[in-house]
């Protein structure tokens, strides 16, 4: 990630767009090349799992160090991630059977989740964090995103 960001919101908007592009690639390739669709899906799955791990680590770290984080928003984030993981498993099972019909449902679910994070969750964190703390978290999260 070569773009210099100054907020968690900016960083995660970029990351969400990257993840959504991967899922769009799965959708497009499902019409053209089934093996490529499976390869793209596996890449997407690995990246979304890593993305969720990064978010969970950041959230746990934030909740341990900052009071006033909106608990309901955090529970919503985790609940939505659980739903997305369940849908990914369904899509994965369907793709193995040659059925690509649920990819669009997963895309919608991911878009809704990203919208919540981009417009509510991360902007709220950006407001509550000091500039130094934001910089520290952005550096850590950026390094995690860049790592294999």
Image: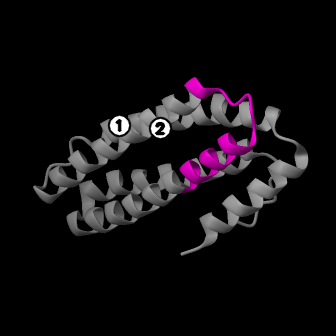
Could you say whether the residue bearing mark 2 is in a helix, strand or loop? helix
Q: Which residue is mark 2?
A: 78
Furthest residue in direction left, as rendered: 97
- Identify the mark at residue 83; answer none if there is no mark: 1
- Identify the mark at residue 59; answer none if there is no mark: none
56 part of magenta stretch: yes
Q: Is residue 113 visible?
A: yes
Q: Name the residue located 25 percent from the left edge and 50 percent from the top edge.
A: 89
Image quadrant in which you'd find residue 138: bottom right
Q: x%, y% of residue 108?
A: 40, 34
Does residue 71 appear left or right of residue 100 in this picture?
A: right
Magenta part of the chain = 54-72
Image quadrant in which you'd find residue 69: top right
Furthest residue in direction top, as rendered: 72
Q: x%, y% of residue 28?
A: 34, 54
Locate the N terminus by quadrant. Answer: bottom right
Q: Earlier in the sequence, mark 2 or mark 1?
A: 2
Q: Name the residue located 62 percent from the left edge and 45 percent from the top edge.
A: 59
Does residue 36 appear left or right of residue 61 in this picture?
A: left
Task: Categorize mark 2 by other alpha carbons within 10 Å: few (<14), some (14-19), many (20+).
Answer: some
Q: CA distance from mark 2 to mark 1?
A: 9 Å
133 part of magenta stretch: no
């Amino acid at each position: 990630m070569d773009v210099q960001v100054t907020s968690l919101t900016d960083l995660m908007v970029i990351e969400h767009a990257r993840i959504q592009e991967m899922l769009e690639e799965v959708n497009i390739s499902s019409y053209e090349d089934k093996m490529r669709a499976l390869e793209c899906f596996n890449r997407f799955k690995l990246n979304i799992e890593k993305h969720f791990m990064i978010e969970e680590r950041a959230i746990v770290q934030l909740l341990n160090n900052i009071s006033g984080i909106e608990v309901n928003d955090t529970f919503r984030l985790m609940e939505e991630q659980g739903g997305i993981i369940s849908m990914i498993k369904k899509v994965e099972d369907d793709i193995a059977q040659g059925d690509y019909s649920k990819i669009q449902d997963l895309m919608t679910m991911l878009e809704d989740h990203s919208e919540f994070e981009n417009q509510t969750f991360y902007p709220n964190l950006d407001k509550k964090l000091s500039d130094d703390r934001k910089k520290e978290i952005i550096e850590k999260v950026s390094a995690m995103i860049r790592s294999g």
